Image: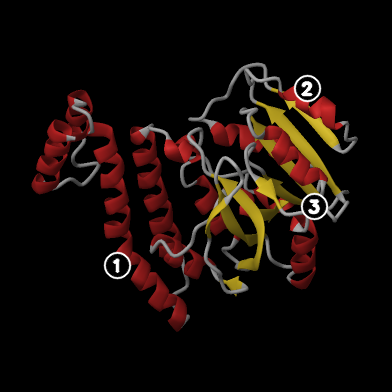
Amino acid sequence: MVKFSIAIPAYKGVFFNECLNSLLQQTYSDFEIIIVDDASPDNLFQIVENNQAIRIQYYKNETNIGAENVVDNWNRCLQYAKGEYFLLMGDDDKVSPLYLEQFAKYIEKYPQVNVFHCRTAIIDQQSNIIDLSEGWPEWESMLDNIYHRMKDRRIQFISDFVYRTSFLKNMNGFVKFPLAWNSDDVTAFEAATNNGIVHINEILFYYRTNPYNISTTGNWMLKAEAMLQKEKWIENRISKIDKANKQECIICQLIQQNLPSQMHSKLLQELSNGVKGHKIHNLFFILKKYKKYRLTFIESIHLLLICIFK
């Protein structure tokens, strides 16, 4: 068994070669690369052929799974994995040459933990660093991670996580939400439930922000639905926490107090995106579901004004 399986659910070709090269330059050698081409219009296979690396496995979907069901492609990647630990790479992102070497060190230090994380630099299309994620404690509980993420104190992406492969497979893969929106968060929460999450404060991952990312596209309705599903998941998980531990009880109470308002604020932002530019048909759709979205009269009027004037 190899130590790491690195999977790329690939579609975009524009930065794919740069992504692949960063993986092939690892100082740690015990890994495989799994590429699942989601019926891309770009010639990804030619890029793979040009690299001529024996450690690369290439698969191509007959039809495009698409962004709405992107988690299905994540889990297809997972099915091919033979490594003890698993990570997903965005096809436009990069990693440090020390990425796997550093994760291997922390895995040895924390053998019971199922999920590991590293610090991230945000890069532009020219690979210039334009931002940086914050430092975390070396170890924190699932509850701490939920609370700080909910309060926007944690910037994280799917590719700065490394998971124990057997754990992911036993839970039937990554948690599926529309567009994979919040799927990375909730999958990490699940993996951290019993043994917490370990963080490496060295910058090992480079997340590229560009116009092609799901996070910068529309799909407001699917994102809103994913937010509601995430809120429900957290509520359900919190309800199962043993309240005998005083500190965990305090964190649970704070999550319960803050979760509705925090999630509702983010939900309203996506609903606002849906009605901008005189999209009256979206406004009617939202108002018909005002109970589901927990809209007040004032919030409904606010959405109407956004629809008219923005």
Between 155 and 239, the one lying in front of the other is 155
| Residue pointed to by mark 3 | 84
Q: Secondary structure at mark 2?
A: helix
Residue density around tag 3, few if under 14, some if 14–19, many if 20 or more, within 10 Å: some
- Amino acid beneath label 2: Gln
Distance, label 2 to label 3, CA atoms, is 29 Å
Residue density around tag 1, few if under 14, some if 14–19, many if 20 or more, within 10 Å: few
Q: Quadrant of residue 269?
A: top left
Q: Secondary structure at mark 3?
A: loop
Q: Which mark is residue 51?
A: none
Circle nearer the N terminus (3, 1): 3
Q: Where residue 144 sits in the image (x, y, percent)?
A: 48, 70
- Amino acid beneath label 1: Gln
Q: Which mark is residue 257?
A: 1
Residue density around tag 2, few if under 14, some if 14–19, many if 20 or more, within 10 Å: few
Q: Quadrant of residue 15?
A: top right
- Amino acid beneath label 3: Glu
Between 121 and 299, the one lying in front of the other is 121
Residue drawn at (27%, 33%), measured in percent from left and top?
274
Distance, label 2 to label 1, CA atoms, is 52 Å
| Residue pointed to by mark 2 | 46
Q: Where residue 231 sits in the image (x, y, percent)?
A: 37, 52
Q: Where residue 267 sits in the image (x, y, percent)?
A: 30, 46
Residue drawn at (9%, 45%), measured in percent from left and top?
297
Circle nearer the N terminus (2, 1): 2
Q: Where residue 58 sits in the image (x, y, percent)?
A: 78, 28
Number of marks drawn:
3
Query: Quick one: which residue is furthest to the bottom in this view?
Result: 246
In front: mark 2 or mark 1?
Answer: 2
Circle nearer the N terminus (2, 3): 2
